[in-house]
């Protein structure tokens, strides 16, 4: 719901983009305000002039973000994201149909990264499909694996996992009672087969890094970054937020202790569908260093004005990494060890 000088306008999201609602849901801003105050009150997060920004999750797992009063001069703005309980994970097959990635990349991710219990970070800007993508990969986890999931809001629900514990931050008013750092420490003490941390934003990176370096079953997380350089800068800043002045020369070693691979996603804006796109798979080398395995051919996409979507298979995964992942359950095919076709579509 967006405020305008002519009154509140309602939009809904479908196929990765907003659409205007045909009917009028609110007569004026006062109705929006009362509606949001009731919802926020039920969620235990008062929405008042003294608390003009509310980000909370509702009892059904939906997430609400409200801004109003002097913070939003035209009126109240509110966004509600459906509960993951009512939004089943989208299968990788559907993401392939939508053109987010080709079949070969999906097969490689499942056979090698998921079954090999690799530590994975999925990064991209807002609405690039990070949570959708991670949940799709999660449908290929062994249902009996003991999995812990920790998040700031309830988004990573995976109904296929039978032995899973979902943990979420707890807040009342403007006070966080249980934060991500505490959730990460709880996960660490429980020693899960697989540990998934919802989007890392700040000081929780410290506890998350301890989970990543200690778990033997695979650590997954998401975050905001468009490429390796941006990722390095953002992670360094997160450690600073947590009070750890990490020397730059040790940053790559810390990243290598957290991740075997990092994946980058983005959302193109040329087509009407604004398609979410798998941009790059990067292997993080032990001791520091980054090796691009597969990347989206942005040059070809631009030259053809969005007509051609293809990916470039630049390097196979290193033999040392392949061997380690095979030991942990990866299914290795010859095409994962040697490049037969440079271009994938």
Image: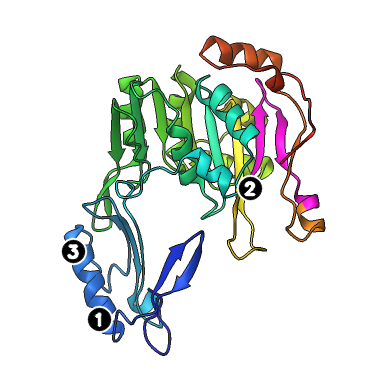
Neighbours of disc 1 within 10 Å: few (<14), some (14-19), many (20+):
some
Mark 3 to mark 2: distance in Å? 37 Å
At a point 61% along the width and 27% down the height, the residue shown is 108
* SS of the residue under disc 1: helix
Q: Are marks 1 and 2 in contact (CB under 8 Å)?
A: no
Q: Nearer the viewer, residue 290 or 315?
A: 315
Q: Which residues are magenta?
A: 278-300
Image quadrant where residue 30 sits: bottom left
Is 279 placed left or right of 25 in the picture?
right
Q: Mark 2 = which residue? A: 226
Position of 92 relative to 299 (above/below): above
Res. 66 mark: none
Q: Earlier in the sequence, mark 1 or mark 2?
A: 1
Q: Are marks 3 and 2 in contact (CB under 8 Å)?
A: no
Q: Nearer the viewer, residue 177 or 300?
A: 300
Mark 1 to mark 3: distance in Å? 15 Å
How would you classify the magenta stretch by its main secondary structure?
A: strand
Neighbours of disc 2 within 10 Å: few (<14), some (14-19), many (20+):
some
**Farthest bottom residue in view:** 6
Indicate the position of residue 237 as horizontal and vertical percent values: 55, 44
At a point 58% along the width and 27% down the height, the residue shown is 254
Q: Earlier in the sequence, mark 3 or mark 2?
A: 3
Indicate the position of residue 83 as horizontal and vertical percent values: 31, 51
Is 291 placed left or right of 176 in the picture?
right
Neighbours of disc 3 within 10 Å: few (<14), some (14-19), many (20+):
few
Quadrant of the drawing holding the C terminus: top right
Position of 325 relative to 32 (above/below): above
Q: Is residue 122 visible?
A: yes
Res. 31 mark: 1
Q: Is residue 26 magenta?
A: no
Res. 41 mark: 3
């Amino acid at each position: 719901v967006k405020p305008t000088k002519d009154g509140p306008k309602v939009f809904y999201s479908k196929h990765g983009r907003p659409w205007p609602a045909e009917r009028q849901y609110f007569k004026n801003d006062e109705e929006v305000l009362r509606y949001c105050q009731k919802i926020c009150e039920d969620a235990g997060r008062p929405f008042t002039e003294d608390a003009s920004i509310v980000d909370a999750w509702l009892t059904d797992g939906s997430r609400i973000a409200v801004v109003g009063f002097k913070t939003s001069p035209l009126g109240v703005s509110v966004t509600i994201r459906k509960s993951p309980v009512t939004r089943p994970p989208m299968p990788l097959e559907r993401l392939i149909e939508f053109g987010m990635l080709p079949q070969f990349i999906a097969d490689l991710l499942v056979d090698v990264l998921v079954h090999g219990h690799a530590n994975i970070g999925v990064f991209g800007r807002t609405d690039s499909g990070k949570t959708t993508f991670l949940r799709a990969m999660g449908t290929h986890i062994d249902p009996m694996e003991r999995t812990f999931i920790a998040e700031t809001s309830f988004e990573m629900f995976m109904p296929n996992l039978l032995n899973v514990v979902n943990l979420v931050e707890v807040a009342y008013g403007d006070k966080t009672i249980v934060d991500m750092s505490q959730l990460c420490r709880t996960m660490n003490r429980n020693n899960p087969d697989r540990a998934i941390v919802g989007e890392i934003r700040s000081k929780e990176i410290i506890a998350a890094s301890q989970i990543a370096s200690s778990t033997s079953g695979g650590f997954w997380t998401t975050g905001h970054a468009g490429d390796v350089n941006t990722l390095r800068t953002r992670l360094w800043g997160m450690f600073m937020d947590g009070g750890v002045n990490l020397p730059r020369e040790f940053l790559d070693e810390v990243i290598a202790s957290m991740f075997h691979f990092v994946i980058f996603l983005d959302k193109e804006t040329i087509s009407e569908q604004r398609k979410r796109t798998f941009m790059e798979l990067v292997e993080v080398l032990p001791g520091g260093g980054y090796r691009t395995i597969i990347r989206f051919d942005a040059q070809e996409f631009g030259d053809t004005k969005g007509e051609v979507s293809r990916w470039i298979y630049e390097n196979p995964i290193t033999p040392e990494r392949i061997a380690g992942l095979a030991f942990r359950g990866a299914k290795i095919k010859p095409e994962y060890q040697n490049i037969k076709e440079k271009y994938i579509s």
